[in-house]
Amino acid sequence: MDYNIDGLAPVVITNKIEITERVFIYQFKRAFNFEAGQVIGISVFDNTDEKMPRMYSIASGNNDELVSILFNVKETGWLTPLLAKKEVGDTIYITAPSGNFLDNNESAFWIATGTGIAPFHSMLQSGSSGQKTLIHGARKLDSFYFEDSFLNVNHLSYIRCCSQEEGNSIYFGRLTQYLKEYNNLPHDQKYYLCGVPEMVVEVRDILIDKGVPYQQIVAEIYF
Amino acid sequence: MKQELLGKTLKELQEIVGELGLPKFTAKQIADWLYKKDIQSIDEMSNLSKKARQLLNEQFEIGYVAPVKVQTSVDGTKKYLYPTATDKFIEAAYIPDKDRATLCVSSQIGCKMGCLFCMTAKQGFQGQLSTGQIINQIKSLPEFEKLTNIVYMGMGEPFDNIEGVMKSTEILTSDYGFGWSPKRITVSTIGIIPAMRTFLANSKCHLAISLHTPFDEERKEIMPIQNVYPISEIIDELRSYEFTQHRRVSFEYIMFKGINDSSKHVKELARLLNGLNCRINLIRFHPIPGTPLEGTSIEKMEQFRDQLISKGIMTTIRKSRGEDIFAACGLLSTKELLKKQEGDH
């Protein structure tokens, strides 16, 4: 990839999928290597003079031909309303992949809300090993993004918590409530958290309150 | 809803007067009224034509918002609470100290960074502050005339609101604005590298970095940002810039008992910062509810400081101020107020 002086390189959108209202997956050809769990900066501009790129976790596997990015449109944000107007064939700009929110390939808990599921999807698609427990929180039943990928995976226990709608085999309530009711959380496994800051901070407090050493908690924040 | 004029840069004011069909020099006159004088309404801008004032009044207001509450510490520190139009609150801490008077301003309501040791993190993120809301904390401060220094160390991560921070420091340091020396201003960051580059390329204000441990794995455990911008990369980036007395870089280091206060940390800090003209400020940890962390004793902090000095790193222990009113480092939060307000509605 040829990154310009602001660290941005152009990529052409090859697929645009609206998976639920105002939530999109954009795909473009992979021309770089990355580790599952890493992020890339995204912008609709080729410079950082006015606006800084926003960071997004890569949602696809590290050997996939296409790179997938999952985002929801935040009407008050500067980027996503503009990004959502882009179509297949349009150019957007990305930074090189970076970040250390990486799978340990051991038994671990993955905890995500909303689009915070993206790095875990990347880890799974990249061949993550070790027994995982994925706890996924969403408000609506149609917001368990990538759920088909997580169902029926041998080494993955997939728990969905829906706070506003009831569904079959789905915990009805907030993810944080589920965790509060969860007895005997192991203290010797890593807990990977990804989502909005409020969720990350609240879940971390619950885990610490349940005796999980803070050193076992790895948090990825959205900003 | 009218737009606030406070917080507009000269360029933005020129755009406004251009759109209103007013002479270009009107922008400089408005800036004078906003940043060098003390008025409460556009009508008081007496050197503007009546037509100009009328046109401005139709779409704009000054944007001053007085604090609604002040708490005073036994040590003289004052914590001011400013309301926002969206029923949220902004905190700023005024810290008088002999011949200095520092204002610690907020750049966001809440914070997204999720640091384990910080009270602001616990309230999550409620929004960016506009440039006007940042400037208002300064201009509407009852002790405005006494201020000698501004530190961007209140609620929020300044470099997650780089636009508001850059514009506000421009207004503070420009001739058309407050005309302050950039040496009186320090912006503190957790280390968002792209925004830090913008700041260093365009501002002469001092920079402070929240370091807290030189070890990557330890920093990850207490500061999630380490997963995205590791401290080693932040330091590498800083090495491309020159730091002198005119523009300093300092490192904030909150001391946690048994976590980051060993000789091993001294050695690694010396290695990490080798060749960088900088200083370290050691800060006492102010415990927050439910924290698994404890503060290092003052005796141990003094030993740690002396060890760093012996390695050639200028190190000081920052005085803890305003602890009794929750104005001290890491304690600012309007979470309870927001909760109360939600309950009232």
Image: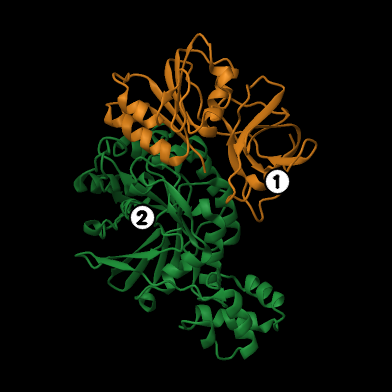
Chain colours: A orange, B green
Q: Residues within 10 Å of mark 1 (few under 14, many from 20)?
A: some
Residue at 73% across, 28% down: A31
Q: The residue under label 1 is which amino acid type?
A: Val
Q: Which residue is identified by label 1?
A: A44
Vertical side of B74 occupied by B213: above or below: above
Q: Which residue is identified by label 2?
A: B345
Quick one: B334 or B74, which is closer to the camera?
B334
Q: The residue under label 2 is which amino acid type?
A: His
Looking at the image, the residue that sits furthest to the right is A89
Q: Regarding mark 1 in the picture, which secondary structure is present there?
A: loop
Where residue B227 appears, x then y in whole percent? 49, 35
Chain designation of label 2: B
Where residue A22 appears, x then y in whole percent? 63, 39
- Spatial CA span between label 2 and label 1: 40 Å
Chain designation of label 1: A
Residue at 67% across, 78% down: B17
Res A87 quadrant in image: top right
Residue at 42% across, 15% down: A107
Vertical side of B252 occupied by B256: above or below: above
Vertical side of B149 occupied by A36: above or below: above
Examine the rendering and report whether any part of residue B118 can be seen. Answer: yes
Residue at 66% across, 26% down: A33
Q: Residues within 10 Å of mark 2 (few under 14, many from 20)?
A: few
Horizontal side of residue B297 vs A119, given as left or right: left
Vertical side of B124 occupied by A150: above or below: above
Examine the rendering and report whether any part of residue B157 can be seen. Answer: no
Where residue B282 appears, x then y in whole percent? 32, 50
Res B185 quadrant in image: bottom left
Image quarter of the N terminus of chain A: top right
